[in-house]
């Protein structure tokens, strides 16, 4: 396969994204997307909506079986429960640490710049909060009463728990379970193949998702909230390019430059879907095949991170808290800010990585520090765009911690990480079925029937 062909997918997806932004802007700025118009009803909220949703559903369709099978393989691959415990505690500690740093920096930046001071936006505010689950319930719910139910609902922590239990029990059963382990390996491979097929469709879906998001964006709102948006995006970029990369370098010695260049696909998927959970298949593929992280680590750290690690969301909470406190003239003080940090870190454990969940966490934080929850209404209009950006940061954090943990456990192929082309594929190749393989499969099925 030639180098230029290997570049196909990322280039195509970036092109889809650029075209989506351009078309979205045209629809938005020319008023073509006004309510009730043909473009609004049949193109933006019709065709683009359908294509985008179908694609996100396709990704979600993969998450549960992929996590289940790859974790079983992962546990069997590690084979030692102590190592499993180590991987678990290391990744938990790093996820919490990076989230705490993220929100602390965000608060420091926003407070220093005094965003929201002197603004009077109160009249526009309306938001009624929902509660994030209390920590005690989160702990209880890690154990599923019914694993099928957990899978049907896509509840990640109980699915992770059940899959690990299955893997560990398989190890204990030993020889007799060997064919089951082999079956799980094959199932995992099939799921990863499906990830490739779905990724090959991404350029078109990303175009539809981005065009719709941009067309529906309140650009005038963006301008009135420019201070909030700029500080938030600045803090997100600082975390992604500086903090996370320092953490990566210090804890693993891996090259931040290589990390940034290879994480792009996962970031684009996160940006387009605004969901860490839906991006799990792509993050998993990126860290295993592009970074060289062994599946035994990635199968745990990636879905775990998608659920409990939300650096970008924490940053949004920090900036939004300072912004709204200033708009309402509430003095939070050091104690208030510390409560915000603690609450955000805890809330990130109990809430899944799905679109808009950051706002739910924010309302919990506001209640705790006594800020008016309806104040969230002020930032609601720009939240979809901010959600897209912060989800890309969330997913980058998951991949960085996965790499650090894998490297420290000797479960990383550094040569793969340092090879710029490792794990790239070309879209035509991903969709191809080898004619010889097809014939072989047909023969095998026939032989089975004739038995
Ligand atoms: N959409 C984010 C995620 O999936 C969560 C949020 O900030 O709303 O990671």
Image (tube, grey):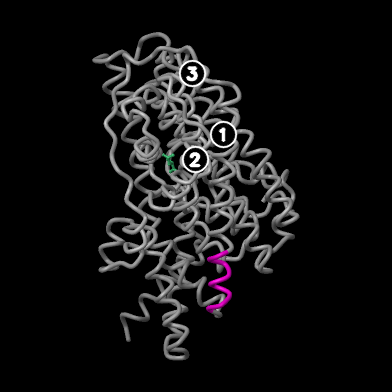
**Residue at 27% across, 66% down:** 148
Mark number, residue 406: none
> Do labels 1 and 2 touch, CB within 8 Å?
yes
Mark sitting on residue 106: 1
Alpha carbon separation for disc pair 3 and 2: 19 Å
Quadrant of the frame with the C terminus: bottom left
Crowd around label 3: few <14 · some 14–19 · many ≥20 (10 Å): many
Of marks 3 and 1, which one's residue comes earlier in the chain? Answer: 1
Instruction: Determine whether label 3 and label 1 are within 8 Å by CB.
Output: no
Q: Where is residue 347 in the image (x, y as percent from the top left)?
A: 41, 47
Quick one: label 1 or label 2, which is nearer the N terminus? 1
> In this picture, which residue range is highlighted in magenta?
81-89
- Ligand 1 contact, mark 1 (Cβ < 8 Å): no
Helix, strand or loop at label 2? It is helix
- Residue 314: assigned label: 2
Is residue 431 at all visible to an observer of this figure? Answer: no
Q: Quadrant of residue 412?
A: bottom right
Q: Is mark 3 on a helix, strand or loop?
A: loop
At numbered mark 1, what does the secondary structure look like: helix, strand or loop?
helix
**In this view, the mark in front (3 or 2):** 3
- In the displayed structure, 431 sits above or below 51; it is below
> Residue reaching furthest bottom?
175
Residue positioned most to the top: 30
For disc 3, the marked residue is 116
* Residue 287 percent coordinates (x, y): 59, 55
């Amino acid at each position: 396969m030639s180098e230029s062909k290997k570049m196909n997918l990322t280039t195509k997806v970036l092109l889809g994204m650029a075209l989506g932004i351009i078309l979205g802007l045209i629809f938005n700025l020319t008023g073509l997307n006004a309510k009730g118009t043909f473009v609004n009803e049949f193109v933006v909220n019709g065709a683009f909506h359908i294509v985008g949703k179908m694609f996100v559903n396709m990704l979600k369709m993969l998450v549960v079986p992929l996590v289940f099978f790859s974790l079983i393989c992962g546990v069997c691959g590690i084979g030692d429960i102590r190592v499993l415990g180590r991987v678990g505690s290391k990744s938990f500690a790093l996820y919490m640490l990076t989230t705490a740093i993220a929100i602390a920096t965000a608060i420091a930046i926003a407070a220093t710049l005094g965003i929201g001071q002197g603004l009077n936006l109160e009249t526009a505010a309306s938001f009624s909060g929902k509660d994030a689950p209390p920590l005690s319930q989160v702990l209880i719910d890690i154990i599923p009463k019914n694993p099928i139910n957990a899978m049907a609902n896509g509840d990640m922590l109980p699915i992770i728990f059940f899959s690990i239990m299955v893997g560990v029990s398989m190890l204990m059963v030993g020889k007799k379970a060997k064919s089951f382990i082999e079956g799980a390996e094959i199932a995992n491979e099939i799921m990863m193949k499906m990830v490739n097929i779905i990724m090959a469709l991404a350029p078109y879906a990303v175009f539809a998702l981005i065009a719709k998001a941009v067309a529906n964006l309140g650009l005038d709102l963006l301008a009135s909230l420019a201070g909030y948006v700029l500080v938030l995006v600045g803090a997100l970029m600082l975390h992604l390019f500086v903090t996370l990369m320092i953490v990566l370098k210090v804890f693993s010695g891996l090259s931040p430059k290589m990390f940034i260049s290879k994480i792009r696909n996962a970031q684009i998927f996160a940006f387009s879907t605004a969901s860490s959970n839906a991006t799990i298949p792509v993050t998993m593929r990126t860290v295993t095949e592009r970074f060289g992280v062994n599946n035994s680590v990635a199968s745990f750290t990636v879905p775990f991170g998608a659920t409990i690690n939300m650096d970008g969301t924490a940053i949004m909470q920090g900036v939004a808290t300072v912004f709204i406190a200033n708009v309402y003239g509430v003095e939070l003080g050091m104690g208030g800010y510390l409560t915000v940090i603690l609450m955000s870190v805890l809330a990130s454990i109990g809430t899944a990585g799905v679109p808009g969940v950051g706002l739910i966490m924010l309302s919990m934080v506001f209640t705790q520090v006594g800020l008016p929850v309806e104040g969230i209404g002020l930032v609601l209009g720009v939240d979809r765009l901010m959600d897209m950006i912060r989800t890309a940061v969330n997913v980058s954090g998951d991949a960085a911690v996965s790499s650090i943990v894998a490297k420290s456990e000797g479960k990383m192929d550094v040569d793969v990480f340092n090879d710029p082309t490792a794990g790239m594929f070309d879209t035509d190749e991903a969709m191809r079925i080898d004619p010889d393989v097809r014939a072989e499969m047909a023969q095998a099925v026939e032989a089975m029937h004739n038995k």
